[in-house]
Amino acid sequence: MTHVNGMMKMSKIDSLILEPNGKVKLAPGGKHLMLISPNRTIKEGGRVVLKLKFKSGRVQIVDLPVKSK
């Protein structure tokens, strides 16, 4: 998130660096994942499965609950 003329503006990042055993907090108003054009409707109380691809080539599948803010 950046501030431009007193307004918050989102900016895309192509990667998120995680140190070994490190943590990054994902939250509204901060760093977060945004699903662009999902292939189905995402509803609160449901679940979404994401495929995370790492620089090393490793792939991790995560199954996450859909929650409201």
Image: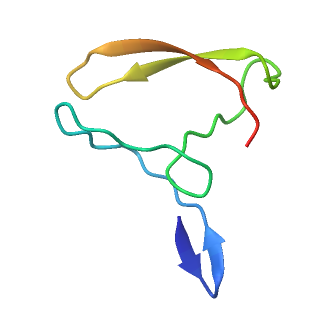
- Quarter of the C terminus within the rendering: top right
The residue sitting at the bottom extreme is: 5
**Residue 51, relative to residue 33: is it above or below?**
above
Quarter of the image where one finds residue 22: top left
Give me the residue at 59% from left, 19% from top: 64
Give me the residue at 74% from left, 19% from top: 39
Q: Position of residue 45 (x, y in %)?
A: 79, 19
Q: Position of residue 7 (x, y in %)?
A: 67, 78
**Residue 41, relative to residue 69: is it above or below?**
above
* Front-lying residue, 64 or 41: 64
The residue sitting at the left extreme is: 20
Quarter of the image where one finds residue 14: top left
Q: Is residue 42 left or right of residue 60?
A: right
Q: Is residue 20 left or right of residue 11?
A: left
**Residue 25, relative to residue 53: is it above or below?**
below
Quarter of the image where one finds residue 46: top right
Q: Position of residue 67 (x, y in %)?
A: 72, 30
Scheme by which the image is coloured: rainbow
Give me the residue at 53% from left, 56% from top: 30
